[in-house]
Image (cartoon, grey):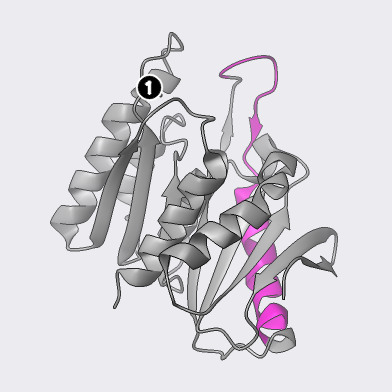
């Protein structure tokens, strides 16, 4: 069962995978992510035998819907609206209906993941709830202003966290975004000290290389880490 489309309230959800699966994967996705979703799903299948259902939720306003608090523009003219709380509330309401429609048990293992700002959203969501089995953050925007201080005061609660970054991402002339390397190393270190199952993978290239395959690896690892 691949690419069934659901309309849930005001959002479009693309669903892939297995009815009755043990793992429910959630990913906030833009048009670029959705274009590579079939390749991402196939790559997940190649890396794990665990049955999963992936619900990719289409995001209309990336900077606003996925940012945890307002922030000024980092590039261009568009800032960040800080509406992640509304997005997480929508997810909390949507998940029971997705579980019911696809015969997924109430105690299924939920993994929230994503790429770039969607990866930061997954990490931030794990500071808000203990309901996540794991978070899968590929090239997450941990350069986001105030994120390290916020996570220190509101620790990530998930016990399985996969982080990845391109090895060229921190070598940018944008001073705000250049902090991504130091911030992700620090996050990996603190999560490991807290006892979480946490991995940090470095990928060759910059931020936009093989986003679908990188995201597939973070989801597959997070499923396999508990086995």
Q: Is 219 in front, or is 46?
A: 46
Q: Is residue 166 left or right of residue 1?
A: left
Residue 68 visible in the shown view: no
- Crowding around mark 1 (Cα neighbors within 10 Å: few <14, some 14 to 19, many 20+) is some
Judging depth in this view, the residue of 100 and 124 nearest the camera is 100
Disc 1 is placed on an element classified as: loop
In this view, which residue lies farthest toward the left? 193
Vertical relation: 157 (above or below) 68: below
Residue 121, given in percent of the width and then of the height, sits at 53, 49
Is residue 148 positioned above or below 159 on the image? above
Q: Which residue is mark 1?
A: 168
Image point 28% across, 46% down: which residue? 200
From the top left corner, tell me how far across and down residue 48 is, in percent: 42, 70
Can residue 155 be seen from the camera position used here?
A: yes
178, above or below 94, in the image:
above
Is 93 included in the stretch rendered in magenta?
A: yes
> Residue 177 location, x and y as percent?
44, 21
Q: Residue furthest top?
A: 173
| Residue 204 magenta | no
Residue numbers of the magenta segment: 74-99
Quadrant of the snapshot with the C terminus: bottom left
Relative depth, front residue between 125 and 16? 16
Is residue 93 found left or right of 200 in the rendered image? right
In percent of width and height, residue 132 lies at 45, 70
At 37% across and 28% down in the image, what residue appears? Answer: 180
Name the quarter where the N terminus is drawn.
bottom right
Query: What's the residue at 35%, 47% (across, down)?
Result: 163
User: What secondary structure do most residues of the magenta stretch adopt?
Assistant: helix
Using the image as rendered, state which of residue 3 and residue 89 is in the foreground: 3
């Amino acid at each position: 069962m691949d690419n069934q489309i659901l309309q849930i309230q005001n959002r479009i959800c693309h669903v892939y995978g297995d009815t009755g699966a043990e793992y429910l994967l959630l990913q906030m996705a833009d048009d670029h992510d959705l274009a590579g979703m079939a390749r991402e799903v196939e790559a997940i299948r190649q890396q794990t035998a665990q049955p999963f259902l992936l619900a990719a939720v289409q995001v209309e306003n990336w900077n606003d819907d996925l940012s945890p608090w307002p922030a000024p523009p980092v590039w261009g003219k568009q800032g960040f609206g800080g509406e992640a709380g509304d997005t997480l509330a929508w997810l909390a309401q949507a998940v029971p209906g997705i579980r019911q429609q696809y015969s997924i048990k109430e105690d299924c293992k939920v993994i929230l993941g994503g790429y770039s700002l969607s990866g930061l959203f997954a990490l931030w969501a794990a500071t808000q709830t203990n309901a996540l089995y794991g978070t899968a953050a590929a090239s997450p925007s941990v350069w986001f202003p105030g994120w390290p201080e916020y996570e220190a005061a509101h620790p990530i609660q998930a016990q399985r966290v996969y982080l990845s970054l391109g090895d060229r991402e921190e070598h940018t002339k944008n001073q705000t975004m250049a902090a991504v390397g130091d911030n992700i190393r620090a996050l990996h270190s603190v999560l490991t000290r807290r006892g979480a199952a946490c991995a940090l993978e470095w990928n060759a290239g910059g931020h936009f290389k093989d986003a679908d395959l990188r995201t597939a690896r973070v989801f597959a690892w997070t499923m396999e880490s508990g086995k």
